[in-house]
Image (spheres, rainbow, N blue to C red):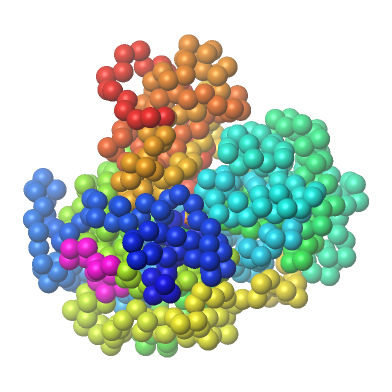
């Protein structure tokens, strides 16, 4: 059984799974993240393995030509020619939190060490970079401070900007189990949308979209006014509190309640929770991260933990990771500024270490452009080759009409197990092996590494991502840097980069996994890697984007689908109840516009328009919700409506806040199939 264990390829909870001899997926009882539990999504993995796969490398010089199948040798020749002709700055790599650590490490080394450019980013930019930025500002590092075990003795849980009941189901079930088994445990949700998480909570605070920073600053105000601060903790372990308090004073509860459209008592209640519960864990996800005010939202929450000493035995801020191996990607430094072992290209010492370690002459000191910046550079003709690995920007990126224009213009390489919407724009498609067909490691949200063992042969001619880059590098004369014969060789190299670092895994090996790096509490002695050793408060300033339209559109996930449905969308069982594409409206808002449930409407922003079927739900007045992940076969994508505005610090796009108008379509010209 241990031969076929692996980590679930969907959310960041990182559940350990195994496939039994009849091909059925089950939860691994020996895995610390889930202890045998699992949700519905991975159950259907075996059924979708062979549906819609890319079988062989395919190429077309011009997009007007049909694809022709080519050999791997020819694919490498085309790539070698392109990469030799173009300057490193004219190339760009966009990779994924779905990849195994060995894949991400190899690609990162290929780009930053071998090609010598930092023109690489990952889809974590659309997901976790805000949490990473805020953690680093507050604690000096972005590791999650606590672990899942902390759920089992906490008595207060705050979910803010997270619909964990559907996005991180196994973790949420663990919270509900704790509540079921223990008196006085409280679960509170703060969100503009009445989500499934909100419905299962003891209290739901429905605030106006984008105003979390105000709400949380006001909680700090109340904590101070009521004498509920942990002054000992603030004095001994933190710095910068006074300025933060000065800013929070702008938001007395009455003022904040009116901005956020909540009750004054709600603000007091959260303050009481921070002040008086025994142990409080706050969970958040894209509701705080995917925002132009996102780093400030994160910091406002971290400030509350610091102001009340809610760390370690007394609580924890716990960012939920969206993707299965976004944590592994952070460890290998796959974003445009990262280097392995939680290092940064801007840090001279970090660069020097990695230059020596890899045996390369120079690593560039400036971070490369982020993916949204790269799209602009493509349109300006400054980036000429884009290589997308394991992600689907033609659906997931903001301001999609602009992204499509860029995909149409650039020489596009798509490396993926499945044919996805981005393939439509490609010049070269490379079939990659997926989880179950290759070996390697993933790291879940609470820093637990799991070895994913293969249980079937790669489909068609597909190859593991690390092997594709290794073979290409060798064909370009990089054999010395890429001597790998197996993923274990890569893991053994990578782990040496972590020695003595916060994410030290140097004493781990494949046969010791699953195992977690760091202690149960990352800052067990309240000593933080900030230089001064103290955690830092930061003013969490409020700003709301200026968007036109009668409604604020909030986007999010579907319950049983993952990301852009490339794999889960091929399972009829998982599609049930999730198509056709819909929008949730408040019935009063809808009826004022002459719209009834199941009518078809046009959602119109200044960036585009899409048709959706109307479902009624408990939305705040003036807000609508639409899932974002539908590929083209189901109609136009929600993200056509979304701006590519980003958070100034994390550069994460503002994916959950767009001004739109809603207009009823009188005679829809398509048949809306599905079983909503
Ligand atoms: Fe997979 Fe997440 Fe479900 Fe666990 S909770 S089985 S990691 S999708």
**Relative to 478, 360 lies left or right:** right
Among the 4 quarters of the image, the one containing residue 388: bottom left
Quadrant occupied by the C terminus? top left
What residue do we see at 34% from left, 66% from top? 21
Q: Is residue 658 visible from the viewing direction of this image?
A: yes
Instruction: From the viewer's side, name the closer residue of 626 and 65.
Output: 626
Q: Is residue 675 magenta?
A: no
Q: Is residue 459 magenta?
A: yes
Among the 4 quarters of the image, the one containing residue 488: bottom left
Instruction: From the viewer's side, name the closer residue of 164 and 239.
Output: 164
Q: Residue furthest front?
A: 22
What residue do we see at 20% from left, 56% from top? 54
Quadrant occupied by the N terminus? bottom left
Q: Position of residue 528 (x, y in %)?
A: 70, 73
**Relative to 313, 619 lies left or right:** left
Give the extent of the magenta segment: 456-468
Q: Is residue 424 above or below residue 59?
A: above
What residue do we see at 50% from left, 56% from top? 38
**Relative to 669, 576 lies left or right:** right
């Amino acid at each position: 059984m241990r031969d076929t264990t692996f980590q679930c390829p969907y959310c960041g909870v990182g559940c350990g799974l195994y496939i039994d001899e009849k091909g059925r997926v089950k939860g691994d009882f020996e895995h610390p993240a889930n202890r045998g539990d699992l949700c519905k999504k991975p159950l259907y993995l075996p059924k979708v393995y062979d549906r819609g796969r890319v079988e062989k490398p395919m190429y077309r010089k011009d997009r007007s030509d049909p694809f022709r199948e080519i050999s791997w040798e020819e694919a490498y020749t085309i790539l070698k020619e392109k990469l030799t002709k173009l300057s490193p700055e004219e190339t760009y790599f966009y990779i994924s939190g779905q990849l195994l650590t060995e894949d991400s490490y190899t690609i990162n080394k290929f780009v930053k060490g071998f090609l010598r450019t930092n023109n690489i980013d990952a889809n974590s930019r659309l997901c976790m970079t805000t949490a990473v930025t805020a953690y680093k500002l507050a604690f000096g590092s972005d590791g999650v401070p606590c672990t899942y075990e902390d759920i089992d003795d906490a008595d207060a849980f705050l979910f803010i900007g997270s619909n964990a009941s559907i996005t991180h189901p196994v973790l949420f079930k663990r919270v509900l189990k704790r509540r079921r088994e223990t008196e006085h445990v409280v679960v509170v949700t703060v969100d503009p949308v009445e989500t499934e998480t909100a419905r299962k909570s003891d209290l739901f605070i429905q605030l106006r979209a984008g105003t979390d920073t105000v709400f949380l600053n006001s909680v700090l105000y109340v904590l101070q006014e009521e004498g509920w601060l942990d002054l000992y903790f603030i004095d001994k372990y933190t710095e910068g509190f006074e300025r933060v308090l000065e800013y929070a004073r702008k938001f007395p509860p009455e003022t904040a309640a009116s901005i956020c459209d909540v009750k004054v008592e709600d603000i007091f209640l959260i303050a009481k929770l921070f002040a008086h519960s025994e142990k409080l864990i706050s969970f958040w996800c894209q509701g705080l991260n995917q925002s132009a005010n996102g780093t400030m939202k994160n910091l406002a929450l971290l400030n509350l933990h610091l102001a009340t000493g809610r760390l370690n035995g007394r609580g924890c801020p716990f960012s939920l990771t969206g993707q299965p191996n976004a944590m592994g990607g952070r460890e290998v430094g796959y974003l445009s500024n990262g280097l392995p072992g939680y290092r940064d290209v801007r840090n001279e010492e970090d660069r020097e270490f990695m230059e020596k370690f890899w045996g390369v002459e120079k690593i560039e000191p400036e971070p490369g452009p982020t993916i949204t910046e790269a799209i602009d550079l493509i349109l300006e003709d400054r980036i000429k080759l884009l290589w997308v690995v394991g992600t689907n920007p033609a659906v997931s990126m903001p301001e999609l009409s602009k992204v499509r224009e860029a995909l149409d213009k650039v020489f596009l390489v798509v490396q993926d197990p499945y044919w996805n919407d981005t393939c439509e724009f490609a010049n070269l498609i490379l079939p990659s092996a997926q989880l179950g067909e290759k070996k390697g490691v993933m790291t879940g949200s609470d820093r637990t590494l799991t070895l994913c063992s293969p249980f079937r042969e790669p489909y068609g001619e597909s190859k593991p991502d690390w092997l594709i880059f290794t073979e290409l590098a060798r064909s370009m004369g990089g054999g010395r840097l890429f001597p790998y014969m197996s993923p274990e060789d890569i893991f053994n190299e990578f782990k040496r980069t972590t020695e003595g670092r916060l994410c030290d895994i140097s004493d781990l090996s494949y046969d010791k996994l699953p195992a977690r790096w760091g202690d149960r509490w990352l800052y067990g002695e309240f000593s933080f890697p900030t230089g001064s050793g103290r955690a830092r408060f930061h003013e969490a300033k409020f700003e709301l984007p200026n968007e036109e339209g009668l409604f604020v559109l909030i986007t999010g996930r579907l319950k049983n689908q993952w990301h852009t449905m490339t794999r889960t969308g091929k399972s009829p069982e998982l599609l049930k109840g999730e198509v056709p594409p819909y929008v949730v409206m408040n019935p009063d808002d809808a009826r004022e516009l002459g719209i009834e449930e199941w009518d078809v409407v046009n959602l119109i922003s200044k960036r585009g328009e899409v048709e959706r079927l109307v479902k009624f739900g408990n939305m705040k007045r003036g807000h609508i919700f639409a899932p974002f992940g539908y590929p083209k076969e189901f109609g136009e994508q929600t993200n056509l409506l979304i701006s590519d505005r980003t958070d100034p610090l994390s550069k994460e796009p503002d994916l959950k806040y767009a001004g739109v108008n809603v207009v009823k379509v009188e005679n829809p010209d398509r048949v809306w199939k599905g079983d909503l």
